[in-house]
Amino acid sequence: MLNRIGVGLRRAVASNSKGSPMNNATMGRMIDHVAFSEVLNSSKYTKVLNSVDLSDDLPLISEWNIESLKSPLPQKRIDAEKMKELAMNFISDNRFSVLANYESNTENLFDNANTNICEAAEELGPIKTIKSGFRRSELKEKATKLCLKDRRNNKKAEVKKACDLMMGKKPRELWSWLKSFSGRFRSSLVNGPIFDKNRQLATYSETKAEVWTAHFEELAKDSTGNSISAEKWSDIGNDSAAMFSECDIPLSWAEICAALKSTPNNKSPGSDGIPSEA
C-alpha cells in the first residue's frame, strides 16, 4: 500500500516482532508499521533490540547491502551514438519541400508543384493501380445489381408457383409452400402457464400435461354434444336470407352522394376500396 500511494516510503518488516504478520499474526506490543524513505530497495533484515529498554519506545536495527544503496542511473531514452550508426536508415519525408523554392510567379509555382507531385506518384507507383481499382469497383457494383435482380426473379417465380398451386386446387402443396416461404419450418412452442377446467393456474410441466390430457379426453367424448350429430347445426342460418331484406333494395344516386359527402376526409376505405358508410 505504501508503494501505491506514491509518498516515497517503504515498509521494513521486523522478523522477530511478536506483532509482526511474519510470526503467525500473534498480537504483541509492537505496531508493525515501520517505514523508511530515501532508499529504493528494501532492507536485508530488520530486528527489534529487545535487550535495550527505552520505556515506551522500541529500538530497531536494519541492514542494507551496499549495492542496493547506490541509486541507479536513469536510462537514456535517446541514444545519440546509435542514431549516428543508423543514420542511413532514417527517412525524412518533407511534404513542404515544394514550398522551399518559393517564387512570386503563381504559374511557375503551380507547374513546379505539379511536376513534383507527378514525380512522387511515379516513384511510389499508386497511379498504376488506379485502373484496377476502378475495375474492381465496377465489377462489385455490377455483381450487386445482379444479386438484386436474381432475388426479384426468384420472388416472382415463388409467387407464380403459389398462384399455380392455388388455381390447380392443391391445398396440401400450397400449405407446404406457405410454411417454407414464411420461414416457419417448426411449430412455435410456448411453455407458459395454462388454466384447468376449474380456472386454476397450472405452471409445472406435469400438471400442465394432466390438464391437456383431461381436455383432449373431453373433446374425444364430446361432452358438449356439438360434434357427434349435425342436427344441432342444420337449422341454424336457414332464415338468414330474410333478416336483412333492405340490402336487396337498389341504391339511388342521391343516397350515394349523401353517403360520400358525410364521409370524413381521413376515413380509410374498406377491403373493396369503398368506405363503409357508402
Image (spheres, grey):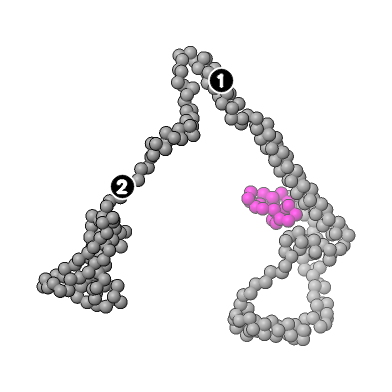
Question: In front: mark 2 or mark 1?
Answer: 2
Q: Is residue 259 magenta?
A: yes
Residue 223, quarter of picture: bottom right
State if disc 1 and disc 2 touch (CB < 8 Å): no
Q: Residue at x 81, y 83 (%)?
A: 228
Q: Residue at x 80, y 77 (%)?
A: 233
Q: Which mark is residue 115?
A: 1
- Asked whether, in this view, residue 201 is left or right of residue 45, the answer is right
Q: Nearer the viewer, residue 96 or 241?
A: 96
Q: Is residue 179 magenta?
A: no
Q: Nearer the viewer, residue 93 or 44?
A: 44
Q: Nearer the viewer, residue 216 or 83?
A: 83
Q: Residue at x 79, y 48 (%)?
A: 153
Residue span colored magenta: 255-278
Can residue 73 be seen at all in this image of the molecule? Answer: yes
Above-or-below relation of 239 to 78: below
- Asked whether, in this view, residue 71 is left or right of residue 185, the answer is left
Crowding around mark 1 (Cα neighbors within 10 Å: few <14, some 14 to 19, many 20+) is: few
Q: Nearer the viewer, residue 161 or 83?
A: 83
Above-or-below relation of 4 to 99: below
Residue 260: image x %, image y %? 69, 50
Residue for badge 2: 73
Residue 203, quarter of picture: bottom right
Residue 179: image x %, image y %? 76, 63
